[in-house]
Image: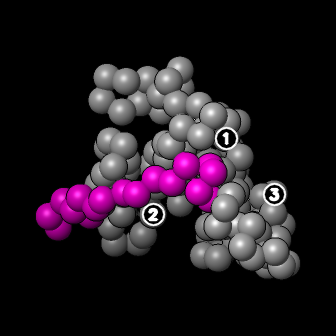
């Protein structure tokens, strides 16, 4: 499996670790710039200021018979591609950091999923 996102973005690292833990597969994390069309969001979107953007740019699930690719194509749409099947477009709702934090603060208990993802960080390969 491969996951792509901007270099140094901890959200992508944690997603890679979570996938490695939950799917029990090798996960390779690759770096890429965040662009939507002609817009370079590396210089526009600032998540520290609450700007909404989706840091995971692409997922590739390698399977024995065919690969499945999920790729962000703009700020509100992802494309799911499976060879031999029609391309699927899926609406993507991106929440701001304030919205995510607000939701997380409602549940102040031990987060086992987060703990499992942290433990699996050493199983992610970087290229």
Q: Are marks 2 and 3 in contact (CB under 8 Å)?
A: no
Left or right: residue 36 versus residue 34 is: left
Residue hosting label 1: 9
Most foreground residue, 20 or 95: 95
Query: Marks 1 and 2, Cα distance to the nearest angstrom?
Result: 21 Å
Give residue 14's position: percent from left, percent from top. Answer: 70, 57
- On the question of residue 116 being in view, the answer is no
Most foreground residue, 64 or 36: 36
Query: Marks 2 and 3, Cα distance to the nearest angstrom?
Result: 20 Å
Give residue 17's position: percent from left, percent from top. Answer: 70, 61
Q: Which mark is residue 102?
A: none
Q: Which mark is residue 122?
A: 3
Q: Residues within 10 Å of mark 2 (few under 14, many from 20)?
A: some
> Residue at left 43%, top 23%?
40
Q: Residue 98 colored magenta?
A: yes
Residue 30 vs 22, above or below: the answer is above
Q: Are marks 1 and 3 in contact (CB under 8 Å)?
A: no
């Amino acid at each position: 499996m491969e996951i792509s996102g901007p270099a140094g973005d901890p959200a992508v690292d944690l997603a890679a670790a979570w996938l490695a833990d939950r799917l029990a597969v090798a996960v390779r994390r690759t770096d890429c710039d965040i662009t939507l069309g002609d817009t370079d969001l590396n210089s526009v979107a600032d998540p520290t200021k609450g700007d909404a953007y989706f840091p995971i740019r692409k997922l590739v699930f390698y399977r024995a018979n065919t690969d499945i690719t999920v790729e962000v194509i703009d700020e509100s749409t992802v494309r799911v591609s499976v060879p031999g099947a029609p391309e699927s477009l899926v609406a993507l709702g991106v929440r701001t950091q304030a919205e995510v934090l607000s939701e997380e603060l409602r549940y102040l208990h031990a987060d086992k999923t987060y703990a499992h993802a942290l433990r699996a960080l050493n199983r992610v390969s970087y290229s």
